[in-house]
Amino acid sequence: MTLGDRTETPLAIKGVLKIENGTQLTAAGKSAQPICLLLQDGLIVAEGQQAAEANADLVLDARGCLVAPGLIDLYCNLREPGAGQKGNIASETRAAAKGGYTTVCAAPDSSPINDSSAVTHLIRDVASARSPIRVLPLGAATRGLEGELLSDMAGLSNAGCVALSNGAETIRNARVLRRAMAYAQTFGYTLMLQPRNQSLAADGFAHDGTVTARLGLLGIPEVAETTAVMEMLLLAEETGVRLHLSQLSTARSVDMVADAQARGVKVSADVAMHQLVFTEAALAGFDSRFHVQPPLRSERDRQGLLAGVRSGVIGAIVSQHQPHDSAAKRAPFGATEPGLSAVESVLSLGLSLVGQGELAITDLVRALTDGPAAILGLPTPALAVGQVADLCIVDPEASWTADAVTILSAGKHVPLSGQPLTGVVRHTICNGQLAWSLS
Amino acid sequence: MTALLNIDQLIGELESGLRRQLEERGIEAPVVVGIRTGGVWLADVLSKRLGLTGPFGELDISFYRDDFSRIGLNPKVRPSRLPFETEGKDIILIDDVIMSGRTIRAAMNELFDYGRPASIMLATLIDMGARELPIQPDVVGRKLTLQSHQRVKLRGPDPLSIEVRDTDQ
Amino acid sequence: MTAHDPSSTSLQLTSDGQLKHFLTLDDLDRALLTDILDTADSFIEVGERTIKNVPLLRGRTVVNLFFESSTRTRSTFELAAKRLSADVLNLDISTSATSKGESLSDTLLNLEAMASDMFVVRHSQSGAPHFIAESVTPGVAIINAGDGRHAHPTQAMLDMLTIRQHKSRFEGLKVAIVGDILHSRVARSQIRALNTLGVAEVRVIAPATLLPSDVESLGCKVEYDMTRGLDDLDVVIMLRLQRERMEGALLPSEREFYRLYGLSTEKLALARPDCIVMHPGPINRGVEIESAVADGPQSVILNQVTNGIAIRMAVMSMAMSGQVSERARARSQEMGS
């Protein structure tokens, strides 16, 4: 196997690691006192006074920093197997570790598409050799993501896929959609779908609104998402599937999901961080970085999505990391490929929302840790004795600037470049090992 | 300084000089063309004084300047107005001040784009010397040598006056 | 949070507010639009001379980069450049490079090797001239000759020149644009120009299928009905209707469109008696406009063609001028530092 130009293995720690003087931050809030944690063999083995008094082979002083559970991303494009010029598992998981992530779900739209157990095994094998963090593959819900034939869902699940997703593609045929849900429900699999009515979205690539009216970009109307959400909710209610709606972009969708959750439909949802920070206004000047799918919508939608995160209707914030080679973004807006290189910026963008008072820090942490864990059926992350040692140490006051040098991802099209971003991840520890350390 | 530059006296010099030239050359029906902005005011005054009944022309030489590569286009360019045929005509070209001669070169290039005149005679109110091109006026109101920090400017149109100003440089 | 630096809004202006590219009318103020119209007036006078050329762009190379073929627009740009004494190179890219899979940025790299001073760009993608202006070497001016559905600023400005010639003002005017606004880059630029120049009212008259979402945000009132829309009007601009609009279920038929939105003699009588009729061309007689109206006394359609050359001469010389003075400023800063 020749993948990537260099091998990045986790910085091996032999023995005992101690983290001291940090402030604990979980979805429950910040600790009043500095905490001390002792890590050994991938687990948290002691805390508090007992940890403080113990000897360690390596001590990390987390003074002034927050110690939080490692972040979990439900949707991240690692570009492997496939488009090597856009990134690979080694480069993108290293970038994710720098972003504070200890677990990422690998989107199924690799090349070849992850619609067979062979591809799933390949992803897991490469990840175990080259990734400093956990990689959980998402299997394709339909073969080739074409929305016509069901994939071998059980085979994918047995190979290690944690859920079935149709990536950025739609299942146009409602009958196929209904059967995919029914089949997934049979075995208790979670189905992750990006809701989009393709005949309404057509060739569009920007929110159909004031900015498209002015710039003459082909629009995707709000109803392209909301009609799909409604259809999926009704089918999910009927089939009883565990439905997860990926990357919502409209306020109306949040309302509909809230209604469905209230009447007991097993539906969860996520939103990409950039949808909470930016609106269609970011497209002014034809800035092709902000060609994303679903498109950035109105301020009203952004407010609705934020409210959804605060209320918990939207359980998770995802990176929707889509690294590209520079040529993919170097063209007129409509000719570029969608997606941001986001995984290194998510935490800082989230902290900017906290700084502006738009999101409580506990909401942010919940949507980046507990929320996605619950959607994947993983145990609630906690910094407690006996738990797996997945955590990140973040200096919330320090700032950094995203540019071609600082960004580890192969994709340099970050949401905010050249201006200071608040929140620097000092260390990321996955399974007791240092996955990232700021040098 | 301004006392030395009596505008009426200078215009009188121009008029009599022009009358002399026209007579010497046997020109009976000249047309007057002024270069914007000062030259146009003078063209108005002189065509009346010379008793010419027809309209006078106005040239805006912005499109013909030779310094486009250095300073670009004059943002306030206005259309030139030559309300008569120039082909075969005897033209009196009028400007307020001549110095390098570049403005006159541009004006003559522009005039030729309207047709081939029989002759062009140049009259300027003030000649500052410092020529950079082989162009000389046929009639001059007055020759003037200024210090390097001084500039001369015709103000108008009504009344016309000449101002010599000190610049900051 | 703003995603881009503020300088991107003035991509087409120099630091002292001169034009250096001509991409859109969106961030140009009334004074600058008026300067363009005034400069064009001077070029109209030039066009009436025996020799119609001026030496402004002598020794400079203008490349007509047409990724979408349009003989009419390309010819007026070519004539405008030649009247400014520039060397002109016509590249019909729609049939060459990009169809062989070469990317736009690679095409540009090749063209820059030719030491061009100006690209006149027509492209089917909205924003392509912006992209080119961001990617080319400094000093090269980009003129938008129509991009996707976004903008066709020279066409809009020549329409403004025509309006000013006939109405001698913009204040108080009521102007309607009729037809396929959705797909029209011309309409977007016209609505912007009319608002900036201070007309009293801009109306768009079309069925909802031919209007963009949030069209009012562009600065216009929507009328679905021709009778109400034409009332008390000073200027009516008819847009060309493409045949393929029937296929996308946007319209039932040309016949129904003509009956409801076509400009006939009877309908024109509803406007002010001195209302002028404009059309960016080419005209579909009997689809959007009756022949008798197109050729009638209120039509100023032919006039628009003459103005097209003058407007293009104006923006080409102004943009080149902006590039020249920006370079001069950069040089003097270099020497100063």
Image: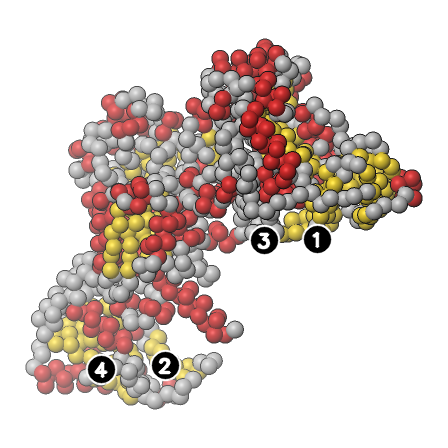
Q: Amino acid at mark 4?
A: Ile
Mark 1 and mark 2 in contact (Cβ < 8 Å)? no
Q: Earlier in the sequence, mark 4 or mark 2?
A: 4
Q: Secondary structure at mark 3?
A: loop
The correct choice, above or below, for B46 with respect to A50 in the image is below
Chain for disc number 2: B
Name the disc covering residue B152, or none. Answer: 2
Q: Amino acid at mark 1?
A: Ser
Chain for disc number 3: A
What residue is disc 1 on?
Answer: A439
Q: Earlier in the sequence, mark 3 or mark 1?
A: 3
Name the disc covering residue B135, or none. Answer: 4
- Residue ID at (45%, 72%): C332
Q: CA distance from mark 3 to mark 1?
A: 14 Å
x, y (%) of residue A6? 59, 47
x, y (%) of residue A283? 49, 42
Q: Amino acid at mark 3?
A: Val
In this view, the residue farthest toward the front is A1
Q: Secondary structure at mark 4?
A: loop
- Residue ID at (37%, 26%): C209
Closer to the observer: label 4 or label 1? 1
What residue is disc 3 on?
Answer: A405
